[in-house]
Amino acid sequence: MSTHTITLTVNGREHTEEVEARLTLADLLRERLDLTATHLGCEHGVCGACTVLLDGKPARSCLTLAVQAEGAKIRTLEGLADPEGELHPVQQGFWEKHGMQCGFCTPGIVMSVVELLERDPDPSDDEIAATLGGHLCRCTGYVKIREAVREAVRLRSGSHSPQEIRR
Amino acid sequence: MSAPAASPPFIGRGLRRREDLRLLRGDGRFIDDLSRPRQLHAAFVRSPHAHAAVESVDGARAAARRGVVAVLTAEDIRGEIGPAPMIWNPIGTEVLVPDSRPLMGDRVACVGAPVAAVLAEDPYTAEDGADAVEVQYGPLPAVIDPLEAMDEGAPLVHPELGTNVCFQTSMGGGDLDDGFGRADVIVERTVTNHRVAGVPIEPRGVLAEPHGDRVALWTSTQTPHLVRTYAVRQLGWDEGMLRVIVPDVGGGFGVKGNLYGEETLLAWCAHRLRRPVKWIESRQENLISTNHGRAQTDVVKIGATQAGRLTALHVKVIADMGAYHLLFTPSIPVTTGVIASGCYAIPALRTDMVGVFTNTFSTDAIRGAGRPEGAHLIELMVDQVAAELGRDPIEIRRLNFIPKKDFPARLPHGPVYDSGDYEASLAKLLEHVDLAAFRREQATLREAGTNRGIGFATYMEACGLAPSKLSGPRSSGIEVSFWESAVVRVGPDGAVTLQTGACPAGQGHETAFAQLVADRVGTEPSRVKVVWGDTDATPNGMGTIGSRSITVGGEAAAVAADRVVAKARRIVAELLEASSEDIELREGRFSVRGSPDKSMTLTDVAHAAHVTDRLPEGFEPGLEASCFFDPPGFVHPFGAHAAIVDVDVDTGRIDIVRYLAIDDCGTVVNPTLVDGQVHGGIVHGIGQALFERVEFGPQGQPLTTSLLDYTLPTAAELPDLELDRTVTPSPHNSLGAKGAGESGTIAATPALTNAVIDALRPMGVDFINMPLSPEAVLTALRLASTGRSPRA
Amino acid sequence: MKPPVFDYHDPATVEEALDLLAVHGDDGKVLAGGQSLVPLLNFRLAHPEHLIDVNNIGELSGIKRDGGRLRIGALTRQSMLERSALVADNWPLLTEALSFVAHAQIRNRGTVGGSVAHADPAAELPVAFLASDADFIVKSKRGERRISAVDFFVTHLTTTMEPDELMVAIDVPAPPEGAGYAFTEFARRHGDFALGGAAVLLAAEGRTCTSAAVGLLAAAPTPLRAAGAEEALVGSELSQDGAEAAAKRAVEQIDPTGDIHGSSEYRKGLIEVMVRRAIEKAAGRLDGDGLGFSRNGGGGR
């Protein structure tokens, strides 16, 4: 089995790691970089809990090999807000509207929604449903997740948070 | 003395959750986020056969792989780990209990039964090792369908037991013959409730670590104390040897409210190997070898008079046990029998329950656990009776509701329903959906080729597991008593700690329990820390199953808080030189009745309780109290749901146009969280009705082993849900609360099924069973077009 | 569910990739978007000894018009094709097909060529290309081949590509002038593999159909052209009855593979409905008046 040295940027920080070819990006983030917000719910690309932004676009980190992330810019939930800082509007929307229960699927959903709103600050209900359609949640019935997304849209349009400007 | 910033009452307010900040920042700690130095990873070798003799297990090739530390088989645990416990034996019944161990030796009776475990330095290598274990199986005849399993000459799931019938029992009351004799119409249907899986998005997982002569076991469970008590029994250890700790849990839905062999085995491995061992269930394992549920065939007969009065109900419940028992397996169909008559005053009823072994994985509790089956069958039958009589199903319901004045209501078969106002909840539903207008719209749409239907479910359920007098070993056969416990402690600075035996899996206990304790002790929720999920740090408890957390655990917390307040009043009385009877607690201040200027806050009292020089000689320092609450009876939430659906008769597709739910769970502690529970519950029911089904091939091969084949509903298929509530407090706890976690699941399947039948009735479809797959819909239409009914 | 052991190769050019395929083609797999291959690895249903990752071969990616034809680099992400205005304006059947492909999170990684080479008969792009008379350009050390879509698919997950060949591009002719198009599909949930579906391109003079392409989704072990339906349509007047008759012809010879989501018989009926709806929708989109006989609910899903 081959091993490879890769360099990638995660939440603005550069990391160089030696990885086995078969290590998934999800396991790299979780096991090597201790970024455990990215969760593994199915490891076959369906549940969406492991979704991260890979070069700006939502992608399943369970279906991406770590070695493929050479040179990539990755964003995960941990990168949205400083540990003690203000929440990102999407995080804030999820808090205000009870957009999660167990919170296991939440990191992936939040990352997909972050990208949606960066691409389209005022998405239609259909666009929101299509984005959420790529994620499974067993707790909420999705009702309050939809409300949370709408709240995030409202919060973003009000004022841009420092996190977003910095990005 | 400072006044609290926010004023009570906090109960009834939709406060934001305190759990969310850690979850949203990525600081949640789920089982797979934990690691311990030198930890090993386990992978299991599981039977690919539904029934086979295990002829040999050769781990040599696996053990030789670099990074593999041990390969364990049944041989290694023989004499070390006893049989898996089953603790709920339906009363008065002999229940056959097959021998089941964490690693099976001679014979496997279902796909997924573990035969070897490989421990390795990392999970990739563990899986490589598991692939390298060579097992020789001698396939044996298998039986998958419980109805076939009851046939004479069917293959025996456990030849040593001599039968596939696990148990039979009956309950009933009233004169059944008289009831059916008085009936003008008798309607008989076979109502199926297919097998489903729980599918929390976080699979199960365990991490065991040796600590001296003890083992710490982190596990993703709803019931830490049950895991502790029964794992040590299996291991032959003292209870003190095992500490069970629960991290954040990524959903439970009943399937994590159990004890699994992986938990016991990993505790043993850690103790034996002196190294931490971790196992994270794969999704494939989760779909194959975490408990399934429902899996019932209910043969129902109901009688009614021409006037629409229900006279008698007879249900035969055939319940698929799977191959082996988990903690509660045989009890599930019994709860179906308890609530089978629903909201209705039926003078005579009888339920015959039979549990049947099959060569499939175990069934046990999944959200609702026996009650969805009961509500489903009665709500379908009420609609069937209405159709038979040519009456409005709403009218039949109203005619037969147990009237409000009859509560507490004793049913003919024994249960007492605590409180209810079924008419009010239905009336409220009908405020939100104008039925006459709907019927006009329906007719117009039909003209234009759209087949729209409406279906109702007026459900009740029994929850708040459980009063020991009604559920203990001598009454309904549970080996333990399901009280719940709490300790409330006020520290020297006035900060409050609640230790509870309840154990959340996403419901928001840390927020809701803090609200109710804050109200009782006169502080703010932010000053109440809720400690849960650690058998060393919490009093004995029974965990979060059966919608019991607030009604049993919350009440224990409230009573413990009251006891703290009683002591606080004695302290205040000493310091303010008054009689403790004259001390009142209002808006966060303890004051002497009639002298509001003389007062203390909880913080002042707490300080005085710990810095005790102002207290008289012999006054016991400290400010804490405990409570073990054993409720006097079950609580009975209820409600009225309606589903409006469009059915595409070309493809069989069902679209939910509207879904409305009126629920009554008594006093609501946090309405936002209750709404969330109801939403999730309804969509779980929608999932079962329309999308989800565990399927097996003819030889018992599981066919739903990925989330592409076991299909959970997504946001793209679902409408927003319209909720409202009525509030009928329970007399069984001082909060007046009932459960909310399962009600949505219980109501949704009959509402949807009745809606589909309503949509298709003009095409001759008068009955249909779940799952309402597109093909099932077209099959029903085809049968109807040839004059047949899919009633079975 | 962790992938088995393999060696990983990361060629930077097509030439390098072909060198690697010449050596490892038999016991290796090309890794493009990975959205089908990596699940197979995680389930350990595939055990390649070598993975040849083509993601860093820039020349394999891109969408361009070449004369009247569309050339899509094999590595082009599905999301890029979905958002291409060029494609939406001129090859709208492809855009419509993509709206049924999985979810955005998958399409961001999933590649156009990967979907074709994976050859799942329930996948949307292969059928859309088949109905569009596309050619697939494959290369090896031995040279370049142009394989027409009708000759490409052999059976479930199997194509006429050799183990040493790499798909480099998809070449799509322009649809007939003024053509109407429709892609219809039925799945249990949005984004799931189709239980049945159809891709239709129609051209007409007046009401008379002059050309018709009907591709069937999940109807056989391969993507399928419904020759009978096409015959029935061409030269006939476009009408509701005609659509029904053509849909019947489309399913005359098919025997879809049944599974837990739908039996063969169910799928056959479903595909008939999807073909009828696609024809109606395509006819409604013909340039000029359009033949507005589509009834309500004409959409596939």
Image: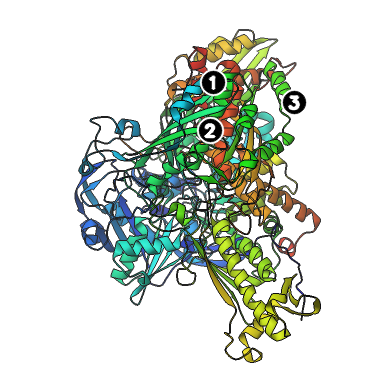
Colour treatment of the image: rainbow
Where residue B289 appears, as percent x and y from the top left, is: 38, 48
| Coordinates of residue B742 in the picture (x, y in percent) | 55, 47
State the residue in front, A114 or B492.
B492
Amino acid type, residue under disc 2 in the picture: Ile
When the figure is inspected, residue B669 is found, relative to residue B563, above or below; the finding is above
Q: Is residue B605 above or below residue C51?
A: below
Give C211 or B44, whichever is nearer the viewer.
Answer: B44
Kindly indicate whether the residues beneath marks 2 and 3 are on one polypeptide chain: yes
Q: Pinpoint the chain carrying mark 2.
A: B
User: Measured from the top left, where is residue A77 in percent x and y?
Assistant: 60, 60
- In the rendered picture of this protein, how many numbered marks are placed on residues? 3
Q: Quadrant of the C terminus of chain A?
A: bottom right
* Pair 1/2: label in front: 2
Residue receiving disc 2:
B346
Residue type highlighted by circle 1: Asp
Sequence-earlier tag: 1 or 3: 3
Name the foreground residue: B104 vs A120.
B104
Mark 1 packing: few (<14 Cα in 10 Å), some, or many (20+)? many
| SS assignment at label 1 | loop
Q: Residue furthest left?
A: B55
Q: Please give the residue where the numbered disc 1 appears in the rendered image.
A: B766
Q: For this view, does B452 lie left or right of residue C219?
A: right
- CA–CA distance between discs 2 and 3? 32 Å
**Can you tell which quarter of the image residue C296 is in?**
top right
Mark 3 chain = B
Mark before the other along the chain sequence, 1 or 2: 2
